[in-house]
Amino acid sequence: MNISFADTKLYGIFVVKNGYIKEEYDNYIKINFQKKGRRNRVLEWIFLLRLNLAYKILNRKKDGYEAKSGGESSRSFCNTDAFAFERIKPHQLAMQLLNYEVISFDIFDTLLLRPFKKPSDLFHIIGKRLNFEGFAFSFYRVRTEIEKELRDEKYRRIGSREITIYDIYHEIERRTNIAYEEGLNEEIQAEMDYCFANPYMLQVFKILKNQGKRIIATSDMYLPREIMIKLLSGCGYEGFDRIYVSCDYECSKNSNGRNLFHIVKSDYADKSICHVGDNMISDIDRAQKEGLYTAYYKNVHQVSETLNNVRMAEVLKGSYLGLIECKLYNGVKNHSFFYQYGYAYGGIYVLGYMKWIDRFVRDKKIDKLLFVARDGYVYKKVYDKICGSVESAYLYWSRVALMKYCVADRNFEDFFERVVKIKAANSAESVSIGYFLRIFEIDNINLVKFNLDERQELNDSVLKNLKQCLLYYWDQIQQTYEAGKKAFCKLLLAEIGSAETIGIVDASSNGYGLMNLKYLIESLTDNAVRVNVFMADRVYANNRGFVYDESVHCYLFSETVNNDCYTSMYGRHNSDGAANLAFEFLTQAPHARFAGIDKKEKFLFDPPENENYEATGEISTGIVDFCNDFTQTFRKDRYIFENISGSEAFRPFEIIARNKAVLRKYFKDIVVEKNIVGGNAKGRKETYADIIK
């Protein structure tokens, strides 16, 4: 078995990176090999270079849906921005198809979908089920290369490349220890497990059936008719007039002379026929040459190229990309950008993070998890639904509460640095000294004594005097927070209950909030409660000792874990902090920030960010839907999602974080809080557009 061009890096560079190029190039090879029985490498390279020129340099595009006959096309509705991709509604396509007497459907990627980027991704799962592992020559390679060899050999013998799954597994049995029946049954079962009805086409199909239309299926495939009937029936498609499969007829849609469309045309000679399919060459161009009308349904796996080169293990990559593309691009529903953002870029990270935490829960015998506001809002939803090994609670917490209840009585310099100096440096959200004092419940102080006025703007020019003022009244300020701190500690102890070992969970971007919360809990319980800190993001270098003693655990990255991801997130390309904010926005809750508890034990909240709540709700829904869909879809092969590494979970976000054009377009109106004191007295709030460069 020789290594083919398709296994080389050049194939990845010139072919795979663009779905349009791959479709046209692969079909060019297929058609010309069928015509001549041999390959012309020189002509193939010329054709490939022309495709790269057209699509990558001249920016040629293809439409998303076309209804054609004799070269006339309907309007295009595909937007080149994958986030804005739309199809006509299923009933609209069905209405068009009602004009024809016979409607032919392609099967795979049209009537049926698989949750895989490539059909061959299923072979990774079959190999694992067969326990055919530990070889440099994997089952994936055995399966794909034997199929190719059998097709090539049959063409040399009789001029047909059509083979069956039975042929493939007879040959696999000859070359491996996989018994024919075992391998055959495993692949058929895997197809049954993972094929599902395209919800868009199922609606179209049902409308046509209810109108009494004659429906046929026409497919190039190695699965014969009897297996196709089972697959289709299991997905809700029944009542076909006929089913045409290439391996049953010894010819494909693209075969010269006698081909499947030629046979269909002969069988329905006096009828108007429209074929619906996803391949521009074999489903559309070839059908038209045989005199059929056509309707093009763009393959869901060719709508977007954004994540094609995401760095993941092959089995996870194929499953992840396959699922999100089947969900987002099938056409039944037009999902908002923020739903897609949550589903495609946040879902895998949150799922991986929660599964990672759940392993710690079992290994360290953790009794309870406290999910910290506001990131914990989404985390808790997913953990309770997907994992749920222990009891969990949602704990109101914030940087404001941190400053009041943990930092104020321990470190004045940190309070001043992180509350006052940072706000003074933020010209986009300038506030008065009086506004700042009210936010932090600081009253009964003599500003005049320090040459200050509450109407003065909080900026660098007043910092020296304000620091002296706050330090002078510091004991009084600490007393102001004491009642609220006691009320919060009472709430905290109630949430901990009888648990002896707990975990506190947040996204974090430095670890300060969680480590101070850990200190507070241990102080309240005289170290009787063991606290494990779980963070998705980094811990600052000066707190690295907590990582080394394994009391703080970072999932995605830190300076000590997945350092290349850490560099990617906090490198020079992210000097404006746009990526950090986009990441934080993945797991925001649709409620205002917790600001503490007053003397009457009433919860205090900052003014609500009403501008963001619709977007945050859609993102949260997208994340939860992905986690549910992914775990349900691959429930029979759970290893695919049980151990998603932090590095793999970060890679999709890494790609979109570097796409500043997308971030500018969709996030520009999102209100952000870079500082502990958000907004100003006039209601001016900083938006993403103020930050991104």
Image (cartoon, rainbow, N blue to C red):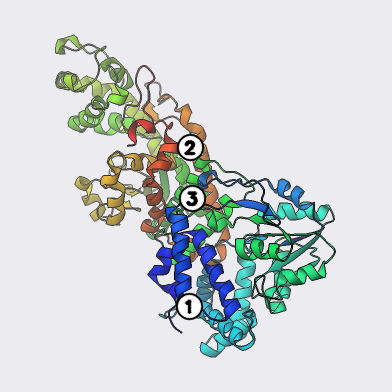
Query: In the rendered view, does 596 fall on the left or right side of 191?
Result: left
Residue at mark 3 to residue at mark 1: CA–CA distance: 29 Å
Residue 616, numbered label: 2
Classify 474 as above or below 255: above
Q: Looking at this rendering, what residue extends furthest in the bottom direction?
A: 174
Write down the quadrant of residue 104 in the picture: bottom right
Residue under pointer 1: 141
Q: Callout 1, which amino acid?
A: Arg
Residue at mark 3 to residue at mark 2: CA–CA distance: 15 Å
Q: How many marks can you see?
A: 3
The residue located at (63%, 66%) in the rendering is: 282
Q: Callout 3, which amino acid?
A: Ala
Position of residue 128 measured from the top left corner of the image (x, y, whole percent):
50, 74
Position of residue 67 measured from the top left corner of the image (x, y, whole percent):
68, 52
Q: Earlier in the sequence, mark 1 or mark 2?
A: 1
Residue 150, numbered label: none
Mark 3: give few (<14), some (14-19) or many (20+) Cα within 10 Å: many
Residue under pointer 3: 344
